[in-house]
Image (cartoon, rainbow, N blue to C red):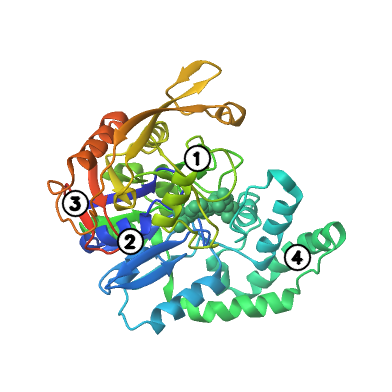
Amino acid sequence: MSTVVIVGTQWGDEGKGKITDYLAREADFVVRYQGGSNAGHTVVVDGDEYRLHLIPSGILYEDKTCVIGNGVVVEPGVLCAELDYLHGKKRRIGSLRISDCAHLVMPYHRCLDEIAEESRGADKIGTTGRGIGPAYMDKAARVGLRVGDLLDPEGFRRQLQRNLERVNPLLQKMYNRPGFDPDELAAEYLGYAEQLRPYIADTSLVIDEAIRQGKNVLFEGAQGTLLDNDHGTYPFVTSSHPVAGGACIGAGVGPTKIDKVIGVAKAYTSRVGDGPFPTELFDDVGAWIREQGQEYGTTTGRPRRCGWLDAVILRYAARLSGLSGLAVTRLDTLSGLPTLKICTGYLYKGERLTEFPHRLEVLRECQPVYEEMPGWQEDISHLNSYEALPETAKRYLQRIVELVGVPIALISIGRERAQTIGLEDAF
Ligand code: IMO
Ligand code: MG
């Protein structure tokens, strides 16, 4: 029996979907525990690309059970469309369970997300516009509607009516926008209920039974450590907890039941959305990495900001999530660069910092301290063992291990399942 949590160690888009899909071979259950359709997980199987936002990346195996945990915020329209999209592909897919405690993203959440961004002006967060923040706000304010409420039409209508009595005047009077019609919204959402009903379950119980039966359970994080609501670059963060502890809350599993935590780290750094990013490159190298790695958002299509690998961030992620192993992705993207740089610390007002600072006004002024290393010119995307990698690539990886203090469990050298080098058994 084994349970493994997969977390993003940077600002999201580290390749968690690909790593989850790869490790899911050995898993029986794959569980999403936080975030919502702000996530964009791309998985390539037999040359076909699948883009998933809500359904766990394990769904592409027909013998797996995928779970959307209570910590996820679910926009049912997106979920139904994703199910239709998967059913429309020829591939047979796994089964799905959705927590009755997961909160629903409502159309007014999207609207409020947009309004909040507009009102922030130049300080905008650069959210994905999927209503994630406002949905989690309603959850914390104890007025949210949950997946389980879809099964009680009367109760659903009552709570929706109450919410719109609060939200509509805000939209209409404060922001000069149309309000939402409670009957129309209820009809739309209760329509989704018909499609989703067979999947709704007490998923904490489902996962607990699986663990008791000795099954392998994979917890698939969305976003990344620096987007964590508590530990990230606040306020330029998301509204959930992508760190490993989030898996316990968001799936309803006790911490003693987690065996391993794999941190997914890109071999460089990228960020989509606003906020400080010390190793960001504004030169040709940054643009080169963006084109080479096709760094454009899966959810919003925005170009991602790119920069050198930052070991300060990875050490921070290792501490916050208790990482037991690293999965280094996109190593192939760096092929062709004559020199590589790794940030080992920051210079702040002449002082050397080795730990990630929490205060943004400090982080904004941090200058990265780099260590330079020779790159490699060879195409490495077809290699199938660590030994076959160029010496310079091995040295780059070894340096990461030394700086972060966590062993490498996996290396990804391409988008396909087969383009993965496993260094230890994950389960
Ligand atoms: P995956 O799972 C990268 C970023 C947004 C914005 C901030 C807040 O694919 O790694 P939100 O819509 O969540 O309120 O936006 O978080 N963000 C992501 N960046 N990958 C993601 O997910 C992200 N999900 C949210 O760009 O900066
Ligand atoms: Mg993504």
Mark nearer the viewer, 3 or 1: 1
Residue at the disc numbered 1: 280
State the residue in front, 293 or 2.
Answer: 293
Q: Is residue 43 left or right of residue 69?
A: left
Disc nearer the start of the sequence (3/4): 4
Measuring from the top left, give residue 123's x and y in whole percent.
Answer: 69, 43
Disc nearer the start of the sequence (3/1): 1
What amino acid is found at the position of numbered circle 1 in the picture?
A: Glu
Q: Kindly tell me whether residue 11 is visible in this rendering.
A: no
Mark nearer the viewer, 3 or 2: 3
Ligand 2 positioned in quadrant? bottom left
What amino acid is found at the position of numbered circle 3 in the picture?
A: Gly
Whether tag 4 and tag 2 are in contact, CB under 8 A, the answer is: no
Whether tag 1 and tag 2 are in contact, CB under 8 A, the answer is: no
How many numbered circles does the render carry?
4
Q: Which mark is residue 164?
A: 4
Mark nearer the viewer, 3 or 4: 3
Residue at the disc numbered 2: 30
Q: Quadrant of residue 106?
A: bottom right
Q: Residue furthest left?
A: 387
The span from disc 4 to disc 2 (Cα, nearest Å) is: 35 Å
Tell me the crowding category of disc 2: few under 14, some 14 to 19, or many 20 or more residues within 10 angstroms, Cα based: many
Residue at the disc numbered 3: 422
* SS assignment at label 1: loop
Q: Is residue 282 left or right of residue 1?
A: right
Residue drawn at (42%, 50%) of the image = 289
